[in-house]
Amino acid sequence: MRVLLAPANIAGQPWGMAQGLRALGHEAEVWEVGPTRFRYPADRTLPVPTDTRQALALVSEAVAGGFDVVHFHFGRTLVGTAGGLPWFWDLPVWAALGTRIVLTFHGSDVRLRSHHLATDEWNFYRHGDVECDEDLIAARLEVLLAYADVATVGSVLDLPYVPGAVVVPKVVDLAALPDAPVAGTVAGRPPVVAHAPSRRATKGTDMILAGLEELRARGVAFELDLVEGVPYAEALARMARADVVVEKLLGGDAGMTSLEAMAMGKVAVARVRPEVRAHAPDLPVVGADPTTFVDVMADLLAAPERLASLGTRGREHVTRHHAPAVVAERLVGLYRVRRPARARGAARLDRARHRDPAARRRAAGRRARGREPAPAPAARGGAPRPARPHPRAARRGPGRPPARAAARARGLTVPDGLAGRALSGGSPRRPGGRARSSRAPRR
């Protein structure tokens, strides 16, 4: 099986998944499109297309790669808004080719601020300046889920935002971690407490630092290592020296920092909500929130034997549930799932649904003024026409190629030059009309 994981290498998750897939004998490539802060490893790092030509070239190259599965991350595909192309324009191409489409959402791409404010006291939307465009999230999900065979999330807390999604555990690339002693076993120095925020507002960093200062005022001895603004490899090396890694006091699930810390035998401290404990009852993360943090840390730092026990349990937990091959086995099962023929895109989204919310509002205004016709009823969710299954990348006899037929059914135009093996041939067609002809009309 050939798998493309793209375009965002969030927290190194696509790379870790690729390592597991390769260990199971599959071919996997990680394409990272756009700059990255933390320099996670990837097979290819590509610039973001800035015009239509570049976007078409990127999709054409991916199609020519012969992938059986495209696994998109962080609410993105290979096509963004470059050159005026509709959002996620490549999704109907992949669907028409018969390529399985899998989506993984990582949290901030689907979370809704209003839901967190209503249900969680210690959420970072309440205590930090964290933006959330709920209209944008809804508009993106509407298009993405219409084409996906499978959608996954990394936390049980994100299930309410993605209908039909399944939880796939976060993956930890164990081979990439430095060797490190188990917590509480290094003599001759005070315990080391590390905090490595990727973004202070979402971790409660100010609360963490204030709590650690209170510990010092109580006379508790420890060394603090605040790991910020450094490459991923350096962050791992510094966490490897620590005994306790405090990930966050806001939010509600163990993130990659906690999992990597446990994989290196460290004690992870984070706020963990009851829903997460119910889903993973053996999770050995030490729970703390802003009201309990100081007391929790005082107890931990006073008990080296407990630190060592928790460090050992954490390493075993990550190996059992988050190793690349373990997660890849779960993914392979999902990669074989296919929604019924042409059930993807059942809403038959028109071009307006691929626009950003502002463009959709402008279109609605033009319709209200009589300057633009309303979308056809079927484009607003009418029942789709049944479509016959067809062999991948093959014509239906003398009829039109399957890629062009599927794109036409969704009201999208597929350029003749794209993906010649499956999309070339035939005359250009209007989204809702007959094929154009180069011959002069009969008189």
Image: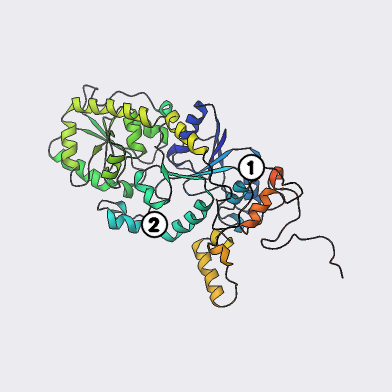
Task: Give the answer, above or below, for where 35 lies relative to 174.
Answer: below
**Marker disc for residue 132:** 2
Residue positioned most to the right: 443
Q: Quadrant of residue 4?
A: top right
Q: Residues within 10 Å of mark 2 (few under 14, many from 20)?
A: some
- Report the residue marked by disc 1: 63
Residue at the (28%, 45%) spot, across then down: 205
Q: Could you tell me residue 429's position as x and y percent?
A: 71, 58
**Quarter of the image containing the C terminus?**
bottom right
Element type at mark 1:
helix
**Closer to us: 134 or 25:** 25
Element type at mark 2:
loop
Disc with the residue nearer the chain's start (1 vs 2)? 1
Give amino acid for label 1.
Answer: Val
**Closer to us: 12 or 152:** 152
Residue positioned most to the bottom: 369
Q: Residues within 10 Å of mark 1 (few under 14, many from 20)?
A: many
Apparent side of residue 346 relative to residue 161 in the rendered image (left or right): right
**Quarter of the image containing the N terminus?**
top right
Residue at the (70%, 61%) spot, across then down: 430
